[in-house]
Image (spheres, rainbow, N blue to C red):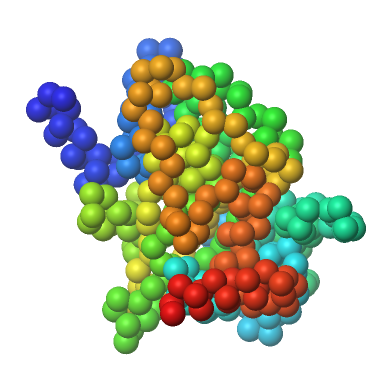
Amino acid sequence: MSALAKHADTEIRQHLPILDLTLLNHPETRAEFLANLQSYARNIGFFYVTGHGISRKKLAQIKAYSKQFFELDQAIKDDISMLHSPHFRGYSRVGEEHTQNRLDAREQIDIGIERPEIPLDENTPLWSRLQGPNQWPKDWPQFQQVVEAWQQDVHQVAIELIHALLDALGLDPYALDSFLTETPHEMLKLIKYPKQIHHADGQGVGAHKDTNILTLLLQDRIGGLQVLSEGQWIDVPYVEDAFVINIGETLELITNGYLVANTHRVVAPQYQDRYSIAYFISPHIFAGDLPVLNLPPALQKLSNGIKSDPTNPLLQNVGENSLKSRLRSHLDVTQRFYPKQYQQIMDLRAGASS
């Protein structure tokens, strides 16, 4: 590697790069865009995207509605608590979600694609319960309308990025469409991190990797998101009108480790509340075992294999892996609707600590 290339690689790892998505659609800039996209996705797995086509008005609108949701009376939010949903949809108070066996200092509402519950029998896979209706605040139909419109907009950006990533890897850009375009498993989180005046090093959300294919995050100016790069935490500051994009473990899995799902966390804000809106896209839960993509030989040689946490292994089966993630994160919901799996998790943790 040349000195110039080494310097560029170091810059990527210390400061997240910005990609302008409009460059993808111009013949004279497309090749450079794809080369940069491949480099950023492989070297750090995090980058910003601008030029995504969602208007500033819509960005401001979803941020405003998200903030208004958290300003609702606590009783209204509790009425749509995730504790009512075996599908892991609805509102969670501060401390009701866990990462790395610690409580997260955030409140949130989890919203998926609005689909009917799947009738269960003895032959139905347990992860079928991930499909089901959302919970919406009563007497506020505009909230549902705005959120569902946002889901459609951000889905289109995600699909465009996935097509571009596959193209950048020398693959058919549409190779994953059968898993993603009709009935993908999507989750939208509207999140509030309350200020923690007396806990400067509090866990907003603990260090983790996302299990999905791709995450698109819209954040505010407060800061707190950090990415692990070469053993050091680097800040991911606000960039106006930009999404923060990160590669999920599923994409790392199907590229046999050529692309990187990186560890990240959120440090709880000390003096001001922090708001963010995260969109996660995964293959549909009945996709079964995902195949490893047949990368060009030059890229296959550089594939690192899967770096899976032995205490939280990445599973090839989409539905099983998606359910595992939710069961571990929302133990109160797991205890209520999945008692057998709850006991297994508790036994595993007891064994690990003994």
| Residue found at the very far top of the displayed protein | 27
Q: Which residue is depicted at the point 35% across and 69% down?
A: 267
- Asked if residue 329 shows in the view, the reply is yes
- Asked if residue 51 shows in the view, the reply is no
Residue 31 drawn above or below residue 214: above
Residue 3 image point, x, y percent: 9, 27
Residue 174 drawn above or below residue 246: above
Residue closer to the observer: 12 or 255: 255
Residue 317 image point, x, y percent: 64, 45
Q: Which residue is depicted at the point 56% across and 62% down?
A: 190
Residue 182 image point, x, y percent: 74, 36
* Quadrant for the N terminus in the image: top left
Q: Kindly indicate the quadrant of the structure image that contains residue 9.
A: top left
Residue closer to the observer: 77 or 347: 347
Residue 182 drawn above or below residue 235: above
* Quadrant for the C terminus in the image: bottom left
Residue 181 drawn above or below residue 93: above
Number of numbered markers: 0
Residue 297 image point, x, y percent: 41, 17
Q: Kindly indicate the quadrant of the structure image that contains residue 48.
A: top left
Question: Is 306 positioned to the left or the right of 13 in the image?
Answer: right
Question: Is 134 positioned to the left or the right of 250 in the image?
Answer: right
Residue closer to the observer: 109 or 6: 6
Q: Which residue is depicted at the point 40% across and 24% down?
A: 300
